[in-house]
Structures are given as C-alpha cells and as structure tokens.
Amino acid sequence: MHVRRTIVCIAAAFLWVTQFPDLAAGQSPELREAFTTYSSLYEQGRYAEAEPHAESALRLAREELGPNDPLAGVVFGKVAELRSTQGRYADAERLHREALAIVEATLGPNHLSAAGHLENLAMVSRAQGRAAEAEEFASRAETIRDKAVVPAAAPPPQRSWQSLIDAGRTAYQRGDYRVAERHLLAAFNQAASFKSHDPRIASSLTNLARIYQAQGRYDDAEPLYEQYLEFIRRNLGPEHTEMGFGFNNLAVIYLAQGRYDDAGRLLKQALVIREKTLGPDHPAVGATLSNLARLYRDQGRHAEAEPLYLRSLEITVNALGPEHSQVVAILENLGYLYYSQGRYADAEPLFKRTLATQENTLGPEHPKVAVSLDVLAALYQDQGRYADAEPLVKRALAIREKALGLNHPELARSLNNLAQFYRTQGRYAETEALYRRSLAILESALGADHPELATSFNNLALLYWDQGNSAEAELNFRRALTILENALGPEHPGLANSLNGMAVVLRERGNYDEADALFTKALTILEASVGPDHPTVGIVLNDLGLSRFAQRRYAEAEPLFKRALALQEGRLGPEHPQVALSLENYAALLRATDRGADAFAMETRADAIRAKHANANTDF
C-alpha cells in the first residue's frame, strides 16, 4: 500500500542518520551516495535506473559495515523493497532474512525493528504462496509488538495499531473476511485518536475500505475512499501523487456499482495526476491505463480498450520487466479482451504466456498459477476443447485446496469452474454437488447477501434448466435477483444476466407477458449503463426477438433480430460465434415469412462461421 510504504521509507532514512550517529559519521561518501541515490530513484518509480545504485549500496554495506552492523540491515531491507516490486520475491526474502538476522544479533530478537522485518517476510512469503509460513512470521511480529517495553507500573497496553493492521491483512489473505474486518475496524477506531495529519489514518481508511470491497459492501467502502481522498487533499495537496491512488481505488468501487461514467471521470483524473507527478513512463501510469481499458472493455468499447492495454503493457514491461506481476495482469486482461471478441487465436498465446510466467516466478503451486490455469481452461472450454480444459481445471482446484485450505473463497470459485466444465458434458449430478459446495463456502466466507452468491444461484438455475426443471430454474434466478437488487440496487448492470435468464425460462413456459417485461427491463438497464451498442445488448435483443417470434408477432421480432445482428457484427466482427446465432434466429423468421432465399443466404453464412471456428479448434 502506497501510504505504508512511504512511512517505511521515512523510518529507514531516519534510522540512517540519527539512531546510529557514531556509525553514520564513519560511512564512506560512496555508500551514502549509493544509498541516497537508490532511495530517490526508487521512490520515483525509476526502477531500472535504481538497480545499479541498489547493487552498489548492497556491496558497499557488506564491505564497510559487515554482518553485525544494524545499518547494514537498513540497506538490505530497503533494497528488498525493490526486489519485491520487481516480483523477485526469492531475492527479497533473502535480503529480509539477512536484515532480520542482523537485528536479532545486535538489538535482540524482541526489538521492534525485528517485528518490521518479520512483517516484510510475511508479505514476501505470502506473495510466493506460502500462506502458513507467512502467518507464522506475522504472528511472531504481532507478539513482539504486543510485548513492546512499557513502564512496569503502567497498565497492560491495548493492542497496537500496527498489530491490528497486520492481523487484519493476514486474515484477509486467508479469506477470513469477518476476522479481518474486526481487526481493521479496531485499527480504524484507534486511528481516530491520532493527530489529524497522521498517515496511519490514511492507511486505516484504505485497509478497512478494501475489506468491505472484498465482501461486496461497496456502499460501506465508498465513503472511506472518499475520506482518504479528503485526507490527502488536506494534508498533501490536490495534485499530490496519492490523489491518483485514491481516485483509482474509488473508480474501482464505481465500476463494481456499474457507475461507469463516474469511474471513467476518476480514472482520467488519476491519469492526469500520475503523468504529471510521476512522468508518463511510471508503472502507476500503466496501471491506470489498464484500469481505463478495463472500463472500456466492460462497456463493449473494444476498439478504444486495445490501444490503452498495449500502451500500459509497454510502460510496465519497460519499468518492471517482462515477468512482473503487473505485466502478467495486463497480459491477462488483454487476453480477456481478445477472448470476448472471439479472437481465440490472439487470446491463447497471451494466456499461455501468463501461465508460464507465473509458474517461473512463483512456482507451480502458487494460487496465482491457479487463476492462469482457469483462464486458459475457459478459453479451451468455449472452443469445445474439453480434453485440453479438464486437466487445467482440476490442477487449479488442487493448487487452491493445498495453498488456501478448504474454506477459502478462491476455492469456491475453483469448484464453480469445475462444475461449469461438468455441466457442458451433461454430468449433472457432479455439477450440482460442486455448485452447492461452492455456494456453502461463499455463504460462510462472505455472508448470505454477497453479490457473488448470485452467480452461484444463476449457475444452479442454468443447471436445472438444462435438466428441464423450469420451476427450480426460476426459483434460483429469483434468488439471484433478490441478492443483486439488495446489494447493488435495482438498476445495476449486473442484474441484466439474471433478468434475461429468468425471462428465457418464463418465455419457454409460455408466460410471454412477464418474460417480455423482464427482457425489456434488462435491455433498459444495459442501454443506460453500458450503452445501446454493447454486445450484451445484442444477446437480450435476440432473446426478446425470439419471444415475439414465438408469439407470431413477426413484424415486432424482425427489427429486434436486425438490430442485434448489426450490433454484433459491428462490435464483435462479422465472424464471431454470436453473429452466427443472430443469423440463425433471423433466418428462422425469414422462413416463417416466406423469404426462403434470404433465409438460405443467412443460414449458409452462419454455417460457414461455425465451420471456421470448429476447424480452428482442431488445428491447435
């Protein structure tokens, strides 16, 4: 987190000059210059330029200070920050361990400086997928902080702010959001007694906001991010680089709430501030560009999203290197963009590259490897390449069970992915068991009203629909709608999927009036939130057209089919699988209205699209 990193850097610089004044006087000018230059470049995000100065500082600290000087630990810890930022977690861990050993040997194992190094080791271990070891480091740090020396006559101290923050983060990482909230809320309340400019207030706000965000409590997270922005504006100024950080976080909340215009406005503000304060080639600029591209992608503005992703990728690779986690995220998002456009041949090498990078940098059993496996498996599944998809989905599940335990929300998502795979194969009993296990984990971890549960109910509804159980399908769609309306509001774009699904069920049961009302509501929500030309609008137009077609209201159905086809051709390209479906629907109407020649032309074109994708799948 940006605010906390600033605090750590200030503390390190203070130790360098004042805590050991007798040693500081004996340092060579070369060591002081190397360390100072490295620190300055690092804080500016100029990591490639900082690298040689970091190496010089390390070499000189070893030569001049040796393994028994606390100042060597300061240098090692500071350079370890760069290694973590570069995604070089093994190197960062080695330096943090060296720093910890120096502190324990010179200042004692219960010195507060040891707690700081243990917390850093916890973060690095967690980044490498070693959750149990990370928790052990965090627990040791917490014990040290809780036993910090106080006067003998003083009453037992309340739990320190830092120990509460660390405990909250540890609980968050293991998916125990309720425990995380309790610790972070206590830290937030404790921060209320700090001076108004204390940076711990900002840290408390963002940490608590993130746990609310993880629980889908966006209305609770939003005012905290707004307070963070006000804190930065008041204490650091309206154009400080941390304002960009705050705008970016609040924009993500707006995205989750479906407030795309508000999110776009904040992301553009963040981009202006970050380019001005950090320069156009800083990785934070790359991150903001990627988020803006994600917004455009969600709005179906694919042509605008792609160049932003490519620019973000160039900036981030140049600044952090080709294997950094931020590069992996951008590649994965660019792959999603191609995937959503039906550009499977463009998406697959990106997904394979992210998987290989995660395995190389984090190891083959890290939870992030599971994410990359799921993404590639979904691509294969959509292409009908089930033999390629199945081992990836099962491997992802095994990784999460081992790394995260049996009750983590990420495991629930893995179970859901395997269930989706079984459903496509008609293995309904296995599918239902996995869906229900996933649902139980999510209810326990996130609460019964979290919007992610709506996805599980939607999936159960589709499973029952596949088996011809329309009553259970309708019931589960209604459960999903209730959760989403309560959590996100009645006009959120996330409702459109459940509305459309339930409308299809009602249509097939002959309840056309209610079905058409739900189709129309879904259409209204989507057009207002993502725009009238979003590809998802085309799906709803097709389904509403089929309802009018089933009622023999051909004159009303035809403009719906025609608009859906034009929209999908324009946004997805003329050879996307969704275009084939639209052509087939329109052709059925043309045949019903005695326009056989036109129908045949559309059917022929649809067959060609489907044959092209089927042939592409067998060429890999």
Image (tube, rainbow, N blue to C red):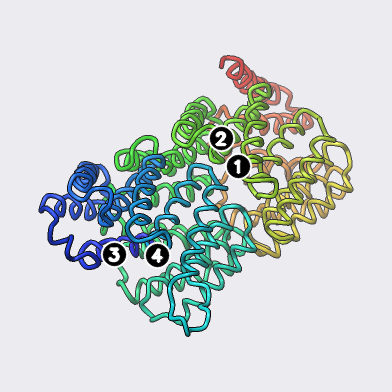
Q: Earlier in the sequence, mark 4 or mark 1?
A: 4
Which callout, 4 or 3, points to the residue nearer the camera? 4
Q: Are marks 2 and 1 in contact (CB under 8 Å)?
A: yes
Q: Is residue 324 left or right of residue 72?
A: right
Q: Earlier in the sequence, mark 2 or mark 3?
A: 3
Q: CA distance from mark 4 to mark 1?
A: 30 Å
Q: Are marks 3 and 1 in contact (CB under 8 Å)?
A: no
Determine which residue is flagged by label 4: 112
Which quadrant holds the N terminus?
bottom left
Q: Name the amino acid type tagged 1.
A: Ala
Please tell me whether mark 1 sits on a helix, a strand or a loop.
helix
Q: Is residue 590 left or right of residue 552?
A: left
Which callout, 2 or 4, points to the residue nearer the camera? 4
Q: Is residue 495 left or right of residue 272?
A: right
Q: CA distance from mark 2 to mark 4?
A: 33 Å
In the image, what residue occupies the spot 60% across and 35% down?
Answer: 374
Please tell me whether mark 3 sits on a helix, a strand or a loop.
helix
Please tell me whether mark 2 sits on a helix, a strand or a loop.
loop
Q: Name the amino acid type tagged 4.
A: Leu
Q: Earlier in the sequence, mark 4 or mark 3?
A: 3
Q: Examine the image and state in which quarter residue 182 appears.
A: bottom right
Q: CA distance from mark 2 to mark 3?
A: 36 Å
In the image, what residue occupies the spot 81% across and 30% down?
Answer: 427
Determine which residue is flagged by label 2: 365
Q: Is residue 33 above or below residue 200?
A: above
Determine which residue is flagged by label 3: 10
- Counting from the top left corner in percent of width and height, residue 417 is at 68, 38
